[in-house]
Image (tube, grey):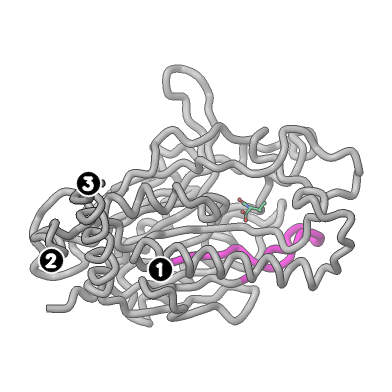
């Protein structure tokens, strides 16, 4: 029996430093409704979906910076975020949403680049991920015109690991089993838990460029990877390319190529689906972000891809059992390695 999951990536066009939160919430809610119309059960939004990508600025350039942070424990109740989850609950949609998080765990203020997984079935947040690979520099470049990426300054590295989880209520007649292993037994046959609820893993933007992010999830049997991003189309200082004198268009094309490369190759290598959602277009009149929200199959094929740099929903119907052949092959290989004695 197939295990069908209908998913969407909700790409957002640019947000600006002074875009009112009500406008952003309004766009996000319209995207949720568009995804629902297409038949989606799960919608993935970009990294820092609620704001401009403010970590490109120095602290002193963003004097009211606290307005860009959310308390992760009040997302469902705060007027700043609640309308999203109320609408998701009304439509019965699961949501993965990226946001800048402030917390005071242990009495100390911390800031993380985070995302949460909201389960409509549970009516609650099921999982949270805090970005581990924070790209860029601690100090701005000397060149005043350089485009900075100061995530190391704004955020602490994630402390929640790459923890896969099962999302309930999306697929009928699943068995109730926990996460673990690669979903196959030592003979290469699907273990009973391949009939369980879908196994999800979340990562954020730069995490997708590192094999260990994917492999940590792959080894937990992840079937769907969710990844929001804000990828600069043009940052020659940051990318060490000042000497290359690439044009803006060449740089953007290369960035798109590399995004597609990591999403397709890693989905294939871990035999999982992936859903990536961009914030795209030119933010704050100057900072270009690539497009390329896409849904990729365990064979590495792009099933759906955004065509614009604005608000856009892409959709695909996934059969999670398509993850099994690749995962079975891994299991056979590791068994062969265990059996091998020189
Ligand atoms: N937000 C990001 O993590 N952006 C990085 C850029 C700076 C390279 C990315 O990996 O897309």
Disc 1, disc 3: CB below 8 Å? no
Q: Nearer the viewer, residue 301 or 308?
A: 301
In this picture, which residue range is highlighted in magenta? 275-291
Q: How many marks?
A: 3
Q: Is residue 318 above or below residue 52?
A: below
Mark earlier in primary sequence (1, 3): 1
- Label 3's element? loop
Mark 1, Cα crowd under 10 Å, few <14 / some 14-19 / many 20+, is: many
Q: Residue at coordinates 26% horizontally, 59% vertically from top-left?
A: 333
Mark earlier in primary sequence (1, 2): 2
Q: Nearer the viewer, residue 136 or 257?
A: 257
Q: In which quarter of the view is residue 138 placed?
A: top right
Lateral position of residue 319 relative to residue 52, left or right? left
Residue 8, image x, y percentages: 41, 72
Label 1 belongs to which residue?
A: 268
| Picture quarter with the N terminus | bottom left
Residue 42, image x, y percentages: 34, 67
Label 3 belongs to which residue?
A: 341
Residue 162, image x, y percentages: 38, 44
Q: Is residue 293 above or below residue 39?
A: above
Lateral position of residue 71 relative to residue 86, left or right? right
Mark earlier in primary sequence (3, 2): 2
Q: In which quarter of the view is residue 311 placed?
A: bottom right
Q: CA distance from mark 1 to mark 3?
A: 29 Å
Q: Which mark is residue 189?
A: 2
Q: Residue at coordinates 13% horizontally, 58% vertically from top-left?
A: 185
């Amino acid at each position: 029996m197939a295990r069908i999951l209908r998913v969407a990536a909700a790409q957002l066009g640019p947000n600006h430093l002074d875009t009112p939160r009500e406008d952003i919430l309004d766009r996000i809610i319209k995207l949720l409704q568009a995804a629902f119309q297409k038949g989606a059960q799960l919608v993935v939004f970009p990294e820092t979906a609620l704001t401009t990508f403010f970590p490109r600025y120095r602290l002193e350039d963003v004097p009211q910076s606290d307005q860009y942070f959310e308390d992760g424990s009040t997302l469902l109740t705060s007027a700043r975020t609640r309308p999203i989850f109320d609408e998701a609950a009304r439509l019965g949609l699961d949501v993965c949403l990226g946001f800048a998080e402030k917390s005071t765990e242990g009495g100390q203020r911390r800031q993380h680049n985070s995302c949460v997984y909201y389960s409509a079935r549970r009516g609650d947040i099921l999982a949270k991920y805090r970005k581990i690979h924070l790209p860029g520099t601690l100090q701005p470049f000397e060149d005043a015109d350089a485009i900075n990426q100061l995530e190391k300054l704004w955020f602490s590295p994630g402390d929640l690991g790459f923890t896969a989880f099962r999302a309930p209520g999306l697929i009928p007649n699943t068995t109730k089993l926990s996460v673990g292993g690669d979903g196959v037994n030592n003979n290469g046959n699907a273990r009973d838990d391949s009939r369980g609820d879908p196994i999800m893993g979340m990562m954020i933007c730069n995490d997708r460029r590192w094999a260990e992010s994917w492999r940590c999830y792959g080894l937990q049997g992840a079937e769907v990877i969710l990844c929001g991003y804000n990828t600069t189309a043009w940052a020659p200082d940051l990318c060490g390319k000042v000497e290359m004198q690439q044009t803006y268009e060449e740089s953007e094309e290369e960035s798109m190529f590399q995004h597609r490369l990591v999403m397709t190759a890693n989905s294939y290598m871990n035999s999982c689906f992936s859903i990536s959602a961009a914030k795209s277009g030119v933010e704050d009149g100057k900072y270009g972000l690539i497009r390329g929200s896409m849904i990729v199959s365990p064979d590495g094929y792009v099933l759906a891809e955004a065509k614009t740099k604005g608000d856009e929903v892409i959709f695909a119907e996934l059969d999670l059992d398509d993850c099994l052949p690749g995962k079975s092959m891994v299991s056979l290989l590791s068994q062969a390695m265990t059996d091998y004695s020189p």
